[in-house]
Amino acid sequence: MNVTGEREKLWVNHHKREDGSTWDEYSVSVSSKNQDGKYTNAYMKLKFAKAVSLPEEIHNGSLVTFKGFLTVDAYKDRTGNEVKKPMIMAMEAQIISPEQKPTPSYDDVAEDYGFEMADDEIPF
């Protein structure tokens, strides 16, 4: 399944091995609005193909545009149990803003994209 992200907020998890080497894992958030108007958030791992050129340092809250596909991240946890989770493999990506910026309001986004939706128009 192809996946495209447009100006998605990127989350970075920094890891350090016992030998002192480090690596970063990236994720994007996915959310849905409940009937009571509150959002339920989940995070999906975003892995970049080796051919993707990224800045040396990426901060939480950076915005990313990417094209890729949905796949499975399979690994064994510390107890030896196999874990399988959905993951996005980005074959093309561009970091739009490497610095943390405030999240735009709904009104700003609606104005940027030329749409508005009243609460009574939402189907739940």
Image: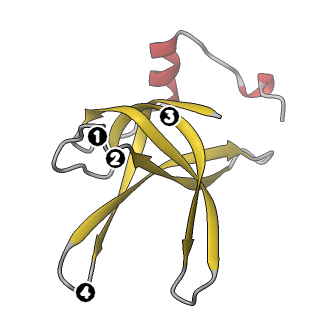
Residue 107 x/y as whole percent: 50, 24
Task: Tell me: residue 116, above or below residue 79.
Answer: above
Sequence-wise, the earlier of marks 4 and 1 is: 4
Q: Nearer the viewer, mark 4 or mark 2?
A: 4
What kind of residue is marked 1?
A: Lys
Disc 4 designates what residue?
18
Disc 3 designates what residue?
68
Sequence-wise, the earlier of marks 1 and 2 is: 2
Q: Nearer the viewer, mark 1 or mark 3?
A: 3
Residue 105 x/y as whole percent: 46, 32
Label 1–label 2 contact, CB within 8 A:
yes
- Secondary structure at numbered mark 2: loop
Please identify the quarter of the rendering in which residue 75 is found. Answer: bottom right
What kind of residue is marked 4?
A: Glu
Q: Residue at x 78, y 22 (%)?
A: 121
Residue lying farthest top?
114
Q: Residue at x 53, y 19 (%)?
A: 110
Disc 1 designates what residue?
101
C-alpha distance separating marks 1 and 3: 25 Å
Residue 115 x/y as whole percent: 59, 12
User: Which labelled disc corresponds to residue 61?
Assistant: 2
Q: Residues within 10 Å of mark 2 (few under 14, many from 20)?
A: some
Left or right: residue 119 compared with residue 57: right
- Secondary structure at numbered mark 3: strand
